[in-house]
Image (cartoon, grey):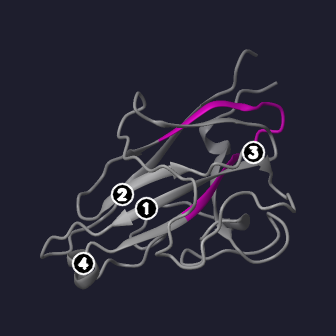
Amino acid sequence: MAAIVDSELFFRLTTTAGTAGNSQAGTPSGSLGKYASTTPWTGGAIGDLFETLTVDDNLGAGIEYRCLAFGHGNAANTAQDVRIFLKDTDGGALVAIGVDPAPASPIGATAAQGASIATETDAPAGVAFASPTTLVSAITLGNVPPGHVRLVWVRRTGAATPSTPADACTLSVRADSGQL
């Protein structure tokens, strides 16, 4: 059995369309929970999850939500003690993350893999948000078996400042493969 390596960890956008996970494409603006989509989210570009924060939204401290599905491509091992935190925050909007209360589920499950919201301004039910910036304070996703996903929510809040600085940050994930 080979250990899980960083290149096997992935995020996908989510979708409220369809009747099963891993069966419909997703878009950043439609990443509102329910099912893992077939569309990878690789991050790394401004506007690749949220649209540009307008001055009005920033001043009004507007809140928006997106949902991502975390999984891994190692067919032999469970990702154990999966933890996620914010890294390299750029200021600007305030970013927080939270784990969907639904447990990890098969990537192609027909039952909803987590909560869904009707609009990007609706808060997902049962999700507690935090802004951990270290591995020590990271949010725990638990164990994610091979072929399963766990939904993670991202909340962006305007900082109520007169300017709109960049609001970028990096999601960092750590997982163990267990004893080999």
x%, y% of residue 107? 80, 54
Q: Are marks 3 and 1 in contact (CB under 8 Å)?
A: no
Q: Residue at x 72, y 15 (%)?
A: 179
Instruction: Kindly report which numbered mark, 4 or 3, lies closer to the viewer in this rendering.
Output: 4
Q: Which residues are magenta?
A: 67-84
Q: In this picture, is 25 found above or below 8?
A: below
Q: In this picture, is 33 found above or below 179?
A: below
Q: Earlier in the sequence, mark 4 or mark 3?
A: 4
Name the disc covering residue 95, or none: 2
Q: Would you name the residue on which mark 4 appears? A: 60
Label 2 environment density (alpha carbons within 10 Å; few <14, some 14–19, many ≥20) = many
Q: Earlier in the sequence, mark 3 or mark 2?
A: 3
Q: Earlier in the sequence, mark 4 or mark 1?
A: 4
Q: Are marks 2 and 1 in contact (CB under 8 Å)?
A: yes
Instruction: Kindly report which numbered mark, 3 or 1, lies closer to the viewer in this rendering.
Output: 1
Looking at the rendered structure, the kind of residue marked 2 is: Val
Looking at the rendered structure, the kind of residue marked 3 is: Gly
